Image (cartoon, rainbow, N blue to C red):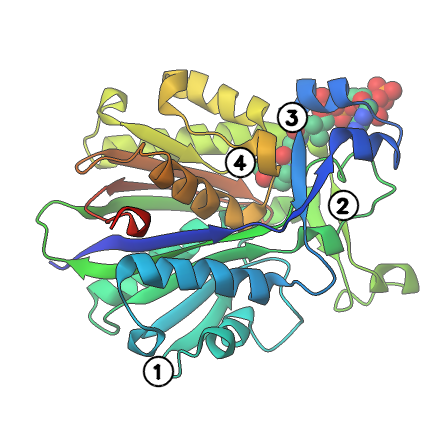
Amino acid sequence: MTQVAISGLGSYVPEKILTNFDLEKLVDTSNEWIIERTGILERRIASSLESSSSMGSLAAKDALETAKLVPEEIDLIITATCSPDGMFPSTANRIQALINAPNAVCFDINSACNGFLSSLMVGSTLIKSEHYKNALIIGSETLSRLIDWTDRNTCILFGDGAGAVVLEPTSEENYGLTDFLFGSDGNNADLLYATGPATGESDLQKEAKIIMDGQSVYRHAVSTMTSITKDLLIKTNTSISDIDLCIPHQANSRIINAVAKNLSLENDKVYTNVDQFGNTSAASIPIALTQAFYDKMLEKGNNLLFTAFGAGLNWGSVLLNWGTIKNPKEQ
Ligand code: ACO
């Protein structure tokens, strides 16, 4: 059976930094409260010239460079986003044009914060089935445009950015994606959703806004990420001590710490950068993975665990045995 591995990766975050102190000027909050409840110190905000496609294309170019592929060689582009450039066409199509990848088939996946992992599932399965020979998977979000900057419950949490990976079959035996498990619960869709032009309920809802029941989302996030990971470990006959590094969706440090505790994962095996970027939804895992790579935290043969939860509700976990990617900055 064809093994599928990550052969390239990259990320991009906007230059503009919005600190907790900046937020103190917008809403009734404090730096201390935000740090205590979320672990977030600052987040990046896209400029008016940036979008999910422009940021995604920059992350994609870096991913292609590390994979040593030219854009014309790309077969499939999947963009995970819940803040697309527009209702249609897909942000993946916009990225296709920006990076000049005319031979790729393009579509988006909207599974909110779980979108990058859902896209890994779809992309790797399509390569395994030999329908496509490679895939560019991009998580890119411009959540700042969905945020109600007067709502202190949500505006402190999110940030903008993009991350990308290239998936290819690998000849390195035992490396690549090991397995995955996912779950969904549409009955709880109203715990976290964005209004927007297509909801058509009232004039007020023509403007996109994130609506969230924070405490319920917190409880569902911790319990589903814990249980899906436990199920995946059982399914793959993997012990938690076999995991070298867990890269969870960077929602907030309390959720990450609670999941790690439930799984008996030591803190030094859990990668976090939520303090710097906040919750960048579908972009958070590929941004963190790229940062972990350039921080030299990924070694050949490492067992990586990705786990995520997001609006939908949707959640999932992916196990992957890290292969070889050369750091282009060291060649
Ligand atoms: N600053 C100061 N006070 C605040 C703020 C703020 N930014 N936001 C809420 N409060 C107040 C509330 O009004 C409330 O005041 P009250 O007691 O006078 O009514 C008090 O703080 C406590 O509010 P809670 O909502 O109970 O606070 P909680 O401890 O649950 O923390 C938080 C809120 C951080 C949103 C938490 O519920 C959470 O992390 N939820 C998960 C949300 C999440 O991560 N969503 C992202 C998308 S899904 C995902 O990525 C996993």
Residue 67 placement, left or right of 92: left
- The residue at label 4 has a CB less than 8 Å from ligand 1: no
Q: Indicate which disc residue 103 carries.
A: 1
Residue 170 placement, left or right of 112: left
Residue 43 placement, left or right of 161: right
Q: In front: mark 3 or mark 2? A: 3
State ligand 1's quadrant: top right
Q: Position of residue 239 (x, y in %)?
A: 23, 24
At a point 47% along the width and 72% down the height, the residue shown is 107
Distance of label 1 from label 3 (alpha carbons): 42 Å
Distance of label 3 from label 4 (alpha carbons): 10 Å
Residue type at mark 1 is Asn
Q: Indicate which disc residue 311 carries.
A: none
Q: Position of residue 276 (x, y in %)?
A: 59, 34
Instruction: Name which quarter of the figure residue 89 lies in.
Output: bottom right
Q: Indicate which disc residue 211 carries.
A: 2
Q: Residues within 10 Å of mark 1 (few under 14, many from 20)?
A: some
Q: Position of residue 291 (x, y in %)?
A: 42, 40
Q: For mark 3, what is the residue?
A: 38
At a point 66% along the width and 72% down the height, the residue shown is 87
- The residue at label 3 has a CB less than 8 Å from ligand 1: yes
Please tell me which of labels 2 and 4 falls first in the chain.
2
Q: Indicate which disc residue 250 carries.
A: 4
